[in-house]
Image (cartoon, rainbow, N blue to C red):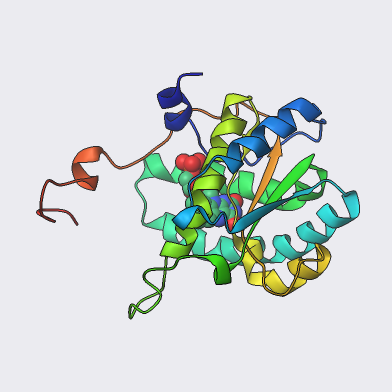
Amino acid sequence: MDIYEAMSTLRAVRRLKPDPIDEDIVERIFTAATWAPTGGNMQPWRMIKVTDPAKKQALEDLYRPHWESYIPGYEKKMESMPASVQSSSRRALEAGTYLARHLHEVPVIAVFCYNPSIMTITDADQPRPSVVGGGSVYPAVQNFLLACRNEGLGCVLTTLLCIEEPSVKKILEMPEDWFTCAHVPVGYPVLGGHGSINRKPLTTMMSENTWGNLA
Ligand SMILES: Cc1cc2nc3c(=O)[nH]c(=O)nc-3n(C[C@H](O)[C@H](O)[C@H](O)COP(=O)(O)O)c2cc1C
């Protein structure tokens, strides 16, 4: 599909069918991830394709309580949102709860892993949380999401399981020096799947030459 159409309709799809995905398609979406750039082309990231029912259930058991504890704060935030945004936020919340209860059923969970010791992290010494390391993994995640979009597969980048990283590493039998930064459930959409997105316009996101009026 047209790349601009793919990017502008890549939204979080959290209601996923348990139906299997053709192996050729699975191979294509994982291969697309491998084309991403990384600092110094070190490629300090890996993917684990989780299909084993017991492992998916174990991941869901770790995920669900964190999603449930996230709901009250989100509902509070929703109270101050305009009515038009409230209804879509409510739908997203319900879809999130659906995912939290059905994660074990999705055909594939892609777990993105990284090894910081082989990353070029140029902002490591700045007095703020470092983000550059993520730049050597998340482009691969985005490639993966776009490839799913292209294949008509629903998907969503999730990170709540990072709170449970030691347990996730144990379930996936990961080595000590590798960590996780994204868990992407993939499956055919139950409802409409990808579609229109709600994002800030370019005028509020970019200025020329200086920071200008950006907020
Ligand atoms: C860094 C990051 C972490 C996220 N973590 C989660 C998550 O743990 N669970 C979840 O359901 N969605 C998660 N999301 C999805 C976002 O909530 C979603 O992309 C955002 O609300 C925009 O929704 P839309 O693409 O449907 O417009 C995450 C997205 C990003 C980029």
Total labels drawn: 0
Q: Is residue 148 visible?
A: yes
Image location of residue 130, percent across then percent down: 41, 71
Q: Of 96 and 107, which appears nearest the observer? A: 107
Image location of residue 14, percent across then percent down: 64, 42
If the image is split into quadrants, where does the C terminus sit? bottom left
Q: Quadrant of residue 210?
A: bottom left
Image location of residue 82, percent across then percent down: 34, 47
Q: Of 14 and 202, which appears nearest the observer? A: 202
Vertical relation: 56 (above or below) 192: below
At 59% from the left and 44% from the top, the residue drawn is 156
Q: Of 51 and 74, which appears nearest the observer? A: 51
Most extreme residue toward the top, as rendered? 1
Image location of residue 139, percent across then percent down: 49, 47
Q: Of 24 and 55, which appears nearest the observer? A: 24
- Left or right of residue 112, residue 35 in this image: left
Q: Quadrant of residue 150?
A: top right
Vertical relation: 137 (above or below) 2: below
Q: Is residue 189 visible?
A: no
At 68% from the left and 70% from the top, the residue drawn is 165
